[in-house]
């Protein structure tokens, strides 16, 4: 293995501007535990310990193409070794040299944005990230952007109006500039080209730097857990007390984060964050905007990956039904080479995949839109923001003179895997796209699925909802008097989708 040495090294990162080195923490120790228990930095709170409430929100800085980028993350599910080579900012960092409050904090005070204060540091850090981003470009976020940045922060007592007012008015106070030059220099000093091997009491954390090293490590340790964003895995440790050893972290592999486009496909590296995948996919499929905006929260999307969603293969994962209805493919990689298959063929049974122990997901290939294909997806969940789907539906349809030429219908939440409604699809092929053929397909759908009942929805509710969503799709796409699809425009301004580098392949 070219540079994956066996020598253990400490984890090095910047904590509120100071370089720190850690060699005595378990690889699955959370950043939150480290802050509160080891560093006695009590500003960052623990509410849920599962990425849901935002009380533990911190900001992480890292060099991307030699420029520092800041993003919010949930410290409760972030493992400490993933900070190697990065910068961590907590609410304690916001105090100014003269002891005064940062404008984000001052605005929260001025607008009564805090009562018990438990959620407040998390809100402050989410807003600090927005503040820095916009202050640097001398612009101001709109309401949608602020709301989107705060979807991962829950407050049980103040209510959100005063917090939103504080956010809106924080730019009116005397500005405080973020020193990104110093951050760039400080980060540059703690970079290393070789893979990280960190060992504590026989628990090992590998962070390879390229795909070759990753494939060789997975061949050597087929039992290893692949860690990407950790937004699923963090819960295995916090809630199920699972021991994971060894861990292979893929977040340092630049090739796996690449997004490229050629004449036919958008190729999304498995470790591209959900946020970056969202920006790239939205350029081609704005129909997915609502799904992305409602996929977890911004801090989860900042570190969670599309490859992680696909590899985890949860039957209630959101991206897979949409990708399957668009005939996306998945590329699996091992030391022996790579193979590509239709994404739907990856899923064999509940959490069982056609993926060998020595294989990892390398990329997802999403076909580019074709003008004649109509596509929609819909998420049903109890809470609008940051909730897991009860049912997720994705439809793609090609009509010729109002006759169904092809139709792919995929649901999440209806079976043990994300699954196509093949019998309903077949009933539609060759038929006129009208009320009677769609109602017939809705009935036939009862043979496609036998959904379970759980806390999210009953079996009957799922069946009825799935059929109704097909009907909604029909109403939006029928040739006469189609209903307008509001979801297409609701989120059009909520994320800047222009800045994600997509490599164009000839
Ligand atoms: C608060 C919260 C809200 C959430 N909301 C949603 C939601 O709305 N919709 C939804 O679908 N999901 C949701 N999730 C689940 C999670 O965020 C997603 O599944 C995410 O895409 C996982 O990506 P990750 O990089 O964090 O994966 P990880 O947690 O790092 O890994 C997940 C699994 O995939 C494996 N894995 C990861 N990458 C690879 C790879 N390249 N090759 C092989 N195996 C790999 C890991 O070994 C593990 O088994 C939510 C999670 C939280 C905590
Ligand atoms: S403690 Fe609730 S998101 Fe981390
Ligand atoms: S101020 Fe009490 S939870 Fe938000």
Image: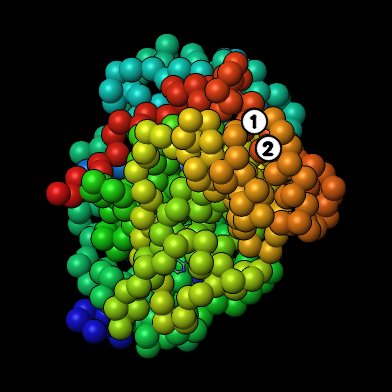
Q: Which residue is nearer to you in this view: 348 or 245?
A: 348
Number of numbered tags placed on the structure image: 2
In the displayed orientation, state which residue is furthest to the top. 172
Query: Mark 1 to mark 2: distance in Å?
Result: 6 Å
Q: Which residue is mark 1?
A: 434
Q: Which residue is nearer to you in this view: 464 or 189?
A: 464
Q: Which mark is residue 437?
A: 2
Which of the image's four quarters has the N terminus?
Answer: bottom left
Q: Position of residue 105 (x, y in %)?
A: 51, 26
Left or right of 435 in this view: 270? left
Are discs 1 and 2 less than 8 Å apart at CB? yes
Is residue 471 visible from the viewing direction of this image? yes
Q: Which residue is nearer to you in this view: 146 or 329?
A: 329
Q: Name above or below for residue 486 compared with residue 312.
A: above
Q: Name above or below for residue 193 compared with residue 56.
A: below
Left or right of 277 in this view: 290? right
Q: Position of residue 262 (x, y in %)?
A: 23, 48
In the displayed orientation, state which residue is furthest to the left. 506
Badge 1 crowding class, 10 Å Cα cut-off, few under 14, some 14 to 19, many 20 or more, is some
Residue at the image point whose x is 41% and y is 82% from the top = 358
Residue at the image point whose x is 33% and y is 23% from the top = 135
Q: Position of residue 332 (x, y in %)?
A: 38, 70
């Amino acid at each position: 293995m070219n540079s994956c040495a066996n020598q253990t090294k400490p984890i090095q990162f910047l904590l509120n501007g100071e370089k720190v080195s850690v060699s005595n923490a378990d690889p699955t120790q959370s950043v939150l535990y480290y802050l509160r228990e080891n560093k006695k930095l009590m500003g960052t709170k623990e509410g849920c310990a599962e990425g849901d409430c935002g009380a533990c929100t911190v900001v992480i800085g890292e060099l991307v193409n030699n420029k520092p980028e800041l993003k919010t993350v949930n410290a409760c599910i972030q493992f400490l070794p993933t900070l190697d080579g990065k910068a961590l900012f907590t609410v304690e960092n916001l105090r100014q040299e003269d002891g005064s409050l940062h404008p984000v904090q001052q605005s929260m005070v001025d607008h009564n944005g805090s009562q018990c204060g438990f959620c407040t540091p998390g809100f402050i850090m989410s807003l600090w990230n927005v503040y820095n981003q916009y202050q640097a470009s001398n612009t101001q976020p709109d309401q949608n952007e602020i709301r989107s940045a705060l979807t991962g922060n829950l407050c049980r007592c103040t209510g959100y109006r005063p917090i939103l007012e504080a956010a809106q008015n924080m730019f009116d106070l005397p500005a405080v500039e973020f020193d990104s030059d110093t951050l760039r220099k400080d980060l540059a000093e703690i970079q290393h080209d070789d893979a990280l091997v960190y060992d504590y009491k026989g628990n090992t954390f590998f962070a390879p730097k390229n795909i070759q090293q990753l494939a060789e490590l997975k061949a050597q340790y087929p039992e290893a857990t692949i860690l990407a964003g950790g937004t699923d895995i963090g819960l295995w440790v916090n809630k199920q007390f699972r021991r994971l050893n060894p861990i292979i972290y893929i977040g340092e592999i630049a090739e796996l984060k690449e997004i490229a486009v050629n004449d036919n496909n958008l190729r999304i590296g498995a470790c591209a964050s959900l946020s970056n995948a969202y920006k790239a996919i939205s350029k081609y499929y704005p129909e997915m905007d609502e799904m992305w905006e409602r996929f977890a929260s911004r801090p989860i999307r900042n570190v969670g990956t599309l490859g992680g969603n696909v590899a985890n293969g949860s039957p209630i994962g959101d991206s897979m039904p949409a990708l399957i209805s668009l005939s996306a493919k998945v590329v699996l990689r091992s030391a022996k080479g790579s193979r590509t298959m239709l994404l739907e063929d990856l899923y064999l049974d509940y959490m069982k995949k056609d993926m060998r122990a020595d294989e990892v997901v390398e990329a997802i290939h999403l076909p580019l839109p074709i003008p004649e294909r109509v596509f929609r997806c819909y998420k049903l969940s109890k809470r609008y923001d940051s909730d897991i789907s009860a049912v997720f539906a994705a439809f793609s349809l090609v009509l010729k003179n109002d006759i169904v030429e092809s139709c792919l219908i995929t649901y999440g939440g209806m079976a043990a895997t994300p699954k196509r409604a093949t019998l309903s699809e077949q009933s539609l092929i060759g038929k006129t796209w009208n009320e009677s053929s769609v109602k017939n397909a809705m009935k036939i759908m009862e043979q496609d699925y036998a959904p379970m009942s759980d806390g999210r929805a009953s079996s009957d509710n799922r069946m009825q909802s799935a059929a109704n969503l097909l009907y909604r799709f029909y109403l939006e796409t029928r040739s006469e008097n189609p209903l307008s699809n509001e979801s297409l425009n609701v989120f059009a301004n909520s994320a800047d989708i222009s800045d994600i580098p997509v490599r164009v392949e000839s």
